[in-house]
């Protein structure tokens, strides 16, 4: 049986039995894996061609228990598994052998009414797993669903419970929504509900302030590109960098007004590093170090490709151009430059020049530049 709103498959069998059904095509995930405080049941990934289907066994749980879920390893029936889920539209099952939808909670009717309804008391369900509040806003943003006033009141009452969730799990939900093609409405809902100010307070402040139009312009553009191209057309580092770029421009403007016609790249790099730490690192959900490094390069590269000084006065050797294009993360910097050119047409010609130069470069070297392996440190033996 397959749930309607996810790619997860459930069946009344122990996970070890899946080896019998799918032979070598199944991978059992480690039992010690957990999503923050909630220790999940061990899952299995079944390879179906190029796709991976997540298979889980039916579970049970007490929906009337208001405490935070710590353990979620109780086996159950299909009815119990449906009732323990968060929303009625997320508790529908499809039986491929019969071609029928199995509904224990009235989810089909809620789908027809485009209404998002929690299973059980929303206050208790939000306290059991606070990430459900983010999921509620996620469903609203992606499928333009309606929510009852009582449910939104419960979210407002429980919103500080989100701080009890695992930061990594919350961050993953944010990333998924940026990649979903509905990032703009999602961040708008998160800001209005007061959840974003608990997770990323500085970003929430900017989305309520003077810079909100510029940030939402990039979010809307990212949604359009993802929906018309592919979900993986914009890497996460590019998506987050596009949110930070308007803030970086605002931070640089006062320095230029002091009479400086250009800024040293070192100064810009310091501003970028400070911005990343202020908005995303010194917050509830800490960004991975590798992503912070990629974002730093992507943002810094914008001022290496579009200098602050008059472009006609810029004199760069071919070696300097090749150095930046030789970086494996340059395509991400080029992707952000393309987004900038769509919002600001004055940078369109600059983007086209860099795009042509990069295509010529990879044709010259015979492929995309690979990551350079770091040389191992030399160890000096102590003198005897």
Image (cartoon, grey):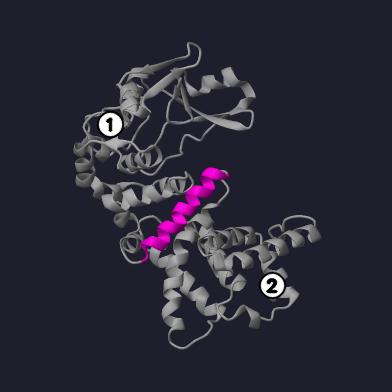
Q: Earlier in the sequence, mark 1 or mark 2?
A: 1
Query: Residue drawn at (34%, 44%), measured in percent from left and top?
Result: 134
Considering the numbered disc 1 on the image, is that residue within a helix, a strand or a loop?
A: loop
Q: Which residue is mark 1?
A: 117
Q: Is residue 375 visible?
A: no
Residue closest to the eye, 1 or 35: 1
Depth check: 121 or 143 in front?
Answer: 143
Question: How busy is the neighbourhood of tag 1: few (under 14 within 10 Å), some, or many (20 plus)?
Answer: many
Q: Residue at x 29, y 36 (%)?
A: 146
Q: Which residues are magenta?
A: 211-229
Residue 274 picture quarter = bottom left
Q: Count residues near mark 2 (Cα–Cα under 10 Å), then give few for <14, some for 14-19, many for 20+.
A: few
What residue is pinned by disc 2? Answer: 380
- State whether residue 371 is above or below residue 30: below
Of residues 208 and 46, the one nearer the viewer is 208
127 left or right of 284 in image? left
Residue at the (45%, 63%) spot, across then down:
244
Q: CA distance from mark 1 to mark 2?
A: 66 Å
């Amino acid at each position: 049986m397959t749930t309607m709103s996810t790619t997860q498959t459930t069946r009344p069998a122990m996970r070890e039995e899946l080896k019998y059904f799918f032979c070598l095509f199944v991978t059992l995930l480690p039992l010690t894996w957990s999503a923050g405080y909630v220790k999940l049941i061990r899952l299995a990934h079944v390879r179906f061609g190029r796709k991976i289907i997540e298979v889980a066994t039916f579970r049970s749980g007490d929906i009337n228990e208001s405490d935070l879920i710590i353990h979620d390893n109780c086996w159950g029936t299909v009815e119990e598994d449906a009732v323990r889920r968060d929303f009625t539209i997320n508790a529908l099952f499809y039986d491929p052998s019969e071609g029928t939808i199995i509904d224990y909670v009235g989810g089909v009717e809620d789908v027809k009414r485009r209404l998002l309804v929690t299973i059980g008391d929303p206050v208790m369900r939000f306290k059991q797993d606070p990430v459900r509040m983010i999921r509620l806003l996620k469903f609203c943003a992606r499928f333009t669903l309606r929510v009852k006033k009582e449910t939104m009141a419960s979210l407002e009452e429980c919103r500080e419970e989100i701080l009890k969730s695992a930061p990594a799990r919350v961050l993953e939900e944010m990333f998924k929504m940026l990649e979903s093609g509905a990032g703009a409405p999602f961040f708008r809902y998160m800001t209005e509900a007061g959840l974003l100010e608990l997770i990323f307070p500085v970003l929430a402040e900017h989305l309520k302030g003077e810079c909100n139009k510029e940030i939402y312009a990039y979010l809307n553009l990212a949604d359009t590109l993802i929906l018309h191209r592919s979900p993986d057309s914009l890497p996460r580092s590019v998506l987050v960098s596009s949110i930070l770029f308007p803030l970086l421009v605002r931070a640089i403007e006062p320095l230029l007004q002091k009479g400086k016609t250009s800024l040293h790249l070192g100064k810009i790099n310091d501003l970028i590093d400070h911005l990343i730490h202020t908005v995303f690192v010194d917050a509830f959900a800490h960004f991975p170090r590798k992503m912070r490094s990629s974002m730093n390069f992507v943002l810094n590269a914008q001022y290496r490709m579009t200098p602050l000084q008059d472009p006609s006065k810029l004199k760069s050797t071919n070696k300097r151009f090749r150095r930046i294009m030789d970086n494996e993360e340059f395509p991400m910097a080029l992707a952000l430059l393309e987004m900038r050119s769509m919002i600001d047409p004055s940078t369109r010609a600059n983007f086209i020049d860099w795009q042509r130069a990069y295509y010529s470069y990879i044709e010259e070297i015979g492929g995309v530049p690979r990551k350079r392996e770091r040389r191992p440190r030399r160890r000096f033996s102590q003198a005897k």
